[in-house]
């Protein structure tokens, strides 16, 4: 469920980005293995998103990052929210803190397109 939500959010952000720019700036594709590739047409850069179901880990490799910056590694954590076994919640964690997926993806897409993480 978390991977599906994360994948759908990436596709949604790419559609929003392209709608705002009015052109096909970002191209999102899912590979045969289930990983995602996002290309920036203007810069010839790509971002790859891998899902490891055994380790419950999502890795984001952004080709536009500076050389000293590391890949983003997100872990899935789940916990019970009630007495029933079906009452569970799962979220993504990085550096032992919950991740705001929307903010993370917008930042990564800004780096991919050459804008930088934050607006100045």
Image (cartoon, rainbow, N blue to C red):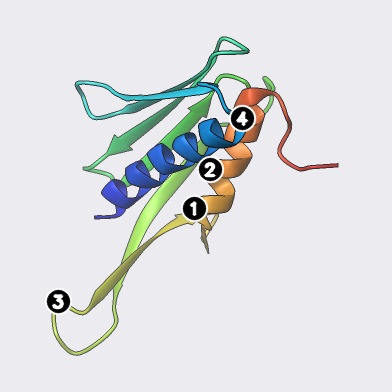
Q: Is residue 5 above or below residue 42?
A: below
Indicate the secondary structure of the residue bearing disc 4.
Answer: helix
For the question of whether residue 65 can be seen, the reply is no
Q: Toward the viewer: 33 or 53?
A: 33
Which residue is labeled 4 in the image?
21
Indicate the secondary structure of the residue bearing disc 1.
Answer: helix
**Looking at the picture, how far across and down is residue 62, in whole percent?**
54, 26
Is residue 82 toward the left or the right of residue 91 in the image? Answer: left
How many C-alpha atoms fall within 10 Å of the one at disc 3: few (<14), some, or many (≥20)? few
What numbered label is drawn on residue 86? 3
Is residue 84 toward the left or the right of residue 110 in the image? Answer: left
Earlier in the chain: of badge 2 and badge 3, it is: 3
Gap in Å between the C-alphas at discs 4 and 1? Answer: 22 Å
Indicate the secondary structure of the residue bearing disc 3.
Answer: loop
Q: Residue furthest front?
A: 22
Gap in Å between the C-alphas at discs 1 and 3? Answer: 24 Å
Earlier in the chain: of badge 4 and badge 1, it is: 4
How many C-alpha atoms fall within 10 Å of the one at disc 2: few (<14), some, or many (≥20)? some
State if disc 3 and disc 4 touch (CB < 8 Å): no
- Please state which of the two labelled residues, at mark 4 or mark 3, is closer to the viewer: 4
- Please state which of the two labelled residues, at mark 4 or mark 1, is closer to the viewer: 4
- Please state which of the two labelled residues, at mark 2 or mark 3, is closer to the viewer: 2
Which residue is labeled 2 in the image?
105
Earlier in the chain: of badge 2 and badge 4, it is: 4
């Amino acid at each position: 469920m978390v991977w599906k939500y994360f994948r759908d959010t990436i596709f949604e952000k790419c559609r929003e980005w392209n709608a705002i720019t009015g052109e096909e700036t970002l191209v999102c594709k899912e590979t045969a293995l289930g990983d995602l590739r996002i290309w920036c047409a203007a810069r010839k850069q790509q971002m790859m998103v891998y899902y490891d179901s055994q380790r419950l880990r999502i890795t984001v490799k952004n080709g536009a990052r500076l050389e000293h910056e590391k890949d983003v590694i997100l872990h899935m954590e789940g916990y019970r929210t009630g007495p029933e076994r079906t009452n569970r919640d799962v979220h993504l964690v990085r550096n032992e803190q919950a991740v705001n997926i929307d903010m993370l993806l917008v930042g990564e897409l800004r780096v991919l397109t050459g804008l930088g993480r934050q607006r100045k």
